[in-house]
Amino acid sequence: MKNISYLCGVFKTHQPTLNIVKRMKNLKVIAFVLSALVVFAGCGNMNNTTKGGMIGGAGGAALGTLAGVLIGKGAGGAAIGAAIGTAVGATAGVLIGKKMDKAKAAAAAVENAKVEEVTDQNGLKAVKITFDSGILFSSGSSTLSSDAQKSLQKFANDVLKVNSDMDCSIQGYTDNTGFKGSTAEQSAQKNQQLSLQRAQAVSTYLVNLGVPASQIKAIEGFGEANPVADNSTNEGRTQNRRVEVYIYASEAMINAANAGTLQ
């Protein structure tokens, strides 16, 4: 009961979460989400694979809708994950969790790649890979460096091609450094364009390496938005100049996991 009272307080005080709940179509879905969260909150010592199963079994797509607001979005706010609209079983969550663990390990072996575990909008495990734009590109350029090409070759061959049933989204970002002779607004627009060009450059190179274009679901540039570090320092600006790649379960992968045929 304490957990339920706490969650009610969360819904009252956090408007983004409340808005999502308002969009749910019936009270049954709301109760489903609440019960899933209560169960999950009491499982603090589970490993990642087991968590994947718990999320899938307890909440399915309903829990994913809520998790999407909290975790399943890229830094720019774009939802990460296929909108499947069906529940994901516990066994399916475990199967997907195991496969994502392998993909994460393979991505971690790529030079210049920072790898993190995230959760997609279906409440399923996903992987975020961040490439420093200072390594990928020269200042003000969207032309990939030779080091970047080597890193992306390994990423394409060892991660994306091996996991063709995973979808991919690419997001580009810059720091807030202005352009000479431009106003702050003009510089922000130019940085947004540059971030998109860099994301597109990564996507184009991956496709040229043999990654199916259909596997890349989104290519976006967010410019100066959503910095991950302090733009007033050189170190912070370096961290903000980045390209983020998200890999997550496709609808086909989820369906195979639900059917017990995912390998």
Image (cartoon, helix red, strand yellow):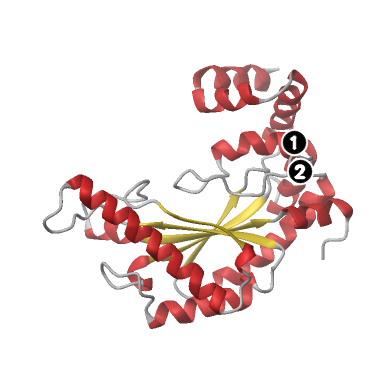
Badge 1: few (under 14), some or many (20 or more) residues near its Cα, within 10 Å?
Answer: many
Q: Is residue 192 above or below residue 160?
A: above
Dot 2 corresponds to which residue?
Answer: 56
Question: Percent from the top left, x then y, of residue 12?
Answer: 54, 17
Q: Quadrant of the N terminus?
A: top right
Q: Is residue 38 above or below residue 162?
A: above
Dot 1 corresponds to which residue?
Answer: 59
Residue 110 visible in this rendered orientation of the protein: no
Q: Is residue 219 left or right of residue 58?
A: left
What's the distance in space between the residues labelled 1 and 2, CA to CA?
6 Å
Contact between marks 1 and 2 (CB within 8 A): the answer is yes
Q: Amino acid at mark 2?
A: Gly
Residue shown at 35%/74% (left/top)? 143
Q: Amino acid at mark 1?
A: Gly
Residue furthest to the left: 181
Q: Is residue 71 left or right of residue 38?
A: left
Question: Percent from the top left, x then y, of residue 141?
Answer: 30, 70
Count of numbered tags: 2
